[in-house]
Image (cartoon, helix red, strand yellow):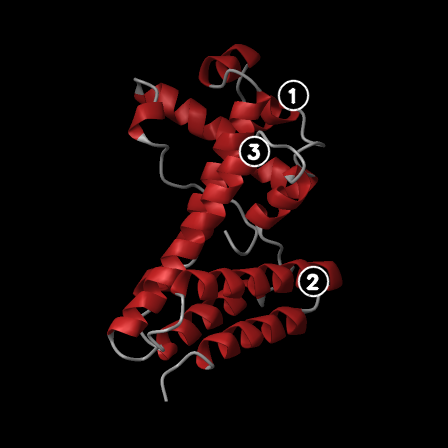
Amino acid sequence: MLSGMVGKSSPPSAAKLPATAHGRRTRAAIIDAAAQMMYQKGVAATSLDDILAASSTGKSQLYHYFKDRSELVKAVVERQTELVLAAQPTLTQIDSMDGVEQWAQAILANHNVPGGPFGCPLGSMAAELKNDPAYQPALAAAFGQWQSLLADGLIRMQDRGHLDPHEDPQRLAAAVLATLQGGMLMGRATMDITVLRDSLEMALDSIRRALRD
């Protein structure tokens, strides 16, 4: 989630699901434990033994569901994507500037709690894995999904006549998310919610400038 806390999420795609309910629960437990530990400790610092202990599973079970560590890390990227997007229910409801502001306010509220502001799990993984081409497609797909959902909202704003029709919703969404990621990174590093608040306001300003007169 954007708050950095890892919880339960929806199951993986049907093509990847184990055949039995027990198998699906075991696979999910491994992914959830890995996601939690990789967020807290980092990908490289999280050992398979750590994950097995946290998930109460055995090595034979892990390798039954994941052929290697790389496949598990990719599954964690997928899970974190689900969690990050699930923490933003208002994202899919954007069709006006008010909707954009409600989305931003919800993000800020998630971080403005004891222990916050938090880093973004996807941003943290992207920073750590940026030099490993094995994970670039999964990370690009994760951010691409997030960007597309925001862009869909901006397109709805264009359709309603709120946003300049000459604006490129995908590029605008990418710029907004880049600003948000920077705000979460700096906010976490300084433990200062003001940094995130200011970054969100700058992101909103970029959309306000694109509104029709």
Q: Do the residues bearing badges 3 and 2 touch, measured as CB atoms within 8 Å? A: no
Tag 1: amino acid: Asp
Q: Where residue 166 sits: x, y (%)?
A: 37, 73
Residue located farthest toward the top when viewing the structure as drawn: 60
How many C-alpha atoms fall within 10 Å of the one at disc 3: few (<14), some, or many (≥20)? some
Three-letter code for the amino acid on which mark 2 is drawn: Met
For disc 1, the marked residue is 49
Q: CA distance from mark 1 to mark 2?
A: 32 Å
Percent position (x, y) of residue 182? Answer: 63, 61
Relative vertical location of residue 101 with respect to residue 3 in this rendering, above or below? below
**Residue located 53% across and 72% down the image:** 203
Q: What residue is shown with label 3?
A: 135
The amino acid beneath tag 3 is Tyr
Q: Residues within 10 Å of mark 1 (few under 14, many from 20)?
A: few
The label shown at residue 202 is none
Report whether 170 appears left or right of 176. left
Q: Position of residue 155 (x, y in %)?
A: 31, 66
Q: Is disc 3 in contact with disc 1, using a CB cutoff of under 8 Å?
A: no
Query: What is the distance, in whole Å, between disc 3 and disc 2 at their CAs?
Result: 24 Å
Task: Quote the CA–CA distance across marks 3 and 1.
Answer: 22 Å
Residue at screen point 51% across, 15% down: 67
Front residue of this view, candidates 44 and 96: 96
Reading the chain from its start, which is encountered first: label 3 or label 2? 3
Q: Position of residue 89 (x, y in %)?
A: 36, 59
Residue at the disc numbered 2: 186
Q: Is residue 36 visible?
A: yes
Q: Name the front one of labels 3 and 2.
A: 3
Query: Extreme right residue here?
Result: 190
Answer left or right for 32 relative to 93: right
Which comes before the other along the chain, label 1 or label 2? 1
